[in-house]
Image (cartoon, rainbow, N blue to C red):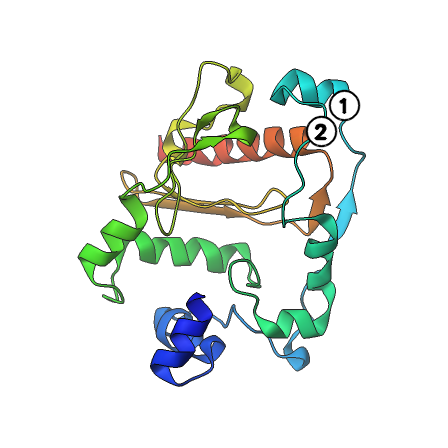
Amino acid sequence: MLAELIERISGRDYRDFVHERVTDALGLPRVVGIPPADQDDIAELALCGEPAPPDELEAIFGVPELPVTEVTDDALLSFNRPDVRAVGVPGGGGVATAATVALFYQALLHNTEELWDPDVLADATSRVRNTFPDMLALGAPANRALASSSPATTERQPARVRPHPVARHVRHNGAGGQIAWADPESGLSFCYLTNGRDVNPIREGRRSIGISSRAAVCAS
């Protein structure tokens, strides 16, 4: 829907619009809609590990099998196709390095180029609109704003699966264990990307929290 709105209002291809108005304006490379001729350095996605057994899933999440969403393994692996990368699928089709994403989060923190209206930026990154329980966070509120989320914790969560406190500000992790967040108090932004899709969601979650917590020490 956002891509359609951009094209109808601007009269331009949304991929070019996003690059010129956002990434290029921030001095960052193109992220949405990578032409096939520029894809030689993109790491292909691959499935890794073994699925979690039903008893382990039930012990952690309370159900022996997680619900199927639109973010399936087949959907993720489709991004290995040059034509799919070139489309720039809205909502998950960006291609970038961890450094590019971390620098983008710096822009969300500081807005030094005054790319966004300060009131609009604050609203999109901090005003929570969705507090529905997050099943993968053991029932903790999702706390989603328009452009980020700030997860809370619940007493059901063991300490090993709770997010580090510093990572509760501007953040939006991605499928497959991708991590991205920024801490307004310290000014630190962090991103971890991997082309290895761990098929065990428990192991993936623990790894994500471990990596993010170690990075957050830099803000202490």
Q: Residue at x 65, y 34 (%)?
A: 204
Q: Amino acid at mark 2?
A: Glu
> Which residue is the site of mark 2?
65
**Occupied quadrant, residue 37:** bottom right
Query: CB atoms at circles 1 and 2 under 8 Å apart?
Result: yes
- Seen at 39% across and 80% down, the residue is 8
Considering every residue shown, the one lying at the far left of the view is: 119
Measured as percent of width and height from the top left, residue 22 is found at: 37, 70
> Quarter-wise, where is residue 165 in the image?
top left
Question: Between disc 1 and disc 2, whose residue precedes?
Answer: 1
> Which numbered circle lies on residue 54?
1
**Residue 123, image x, y percentages:** 24, 50
Q: Left or right: where does residue 43 sit relative to residue 136?
A: right
Residue for point 35% across, 74% down = 21
Dot 2 lies on which element? Answer: loop
- Which mark is drawn over residue 92? none
Q: On the rendered image, what quadrant is the N terminus found in?
A: bottom left
Q: Badge 1: few (under 14), some or many (20 or more) residues near its Cα, within 10 Å? A: few
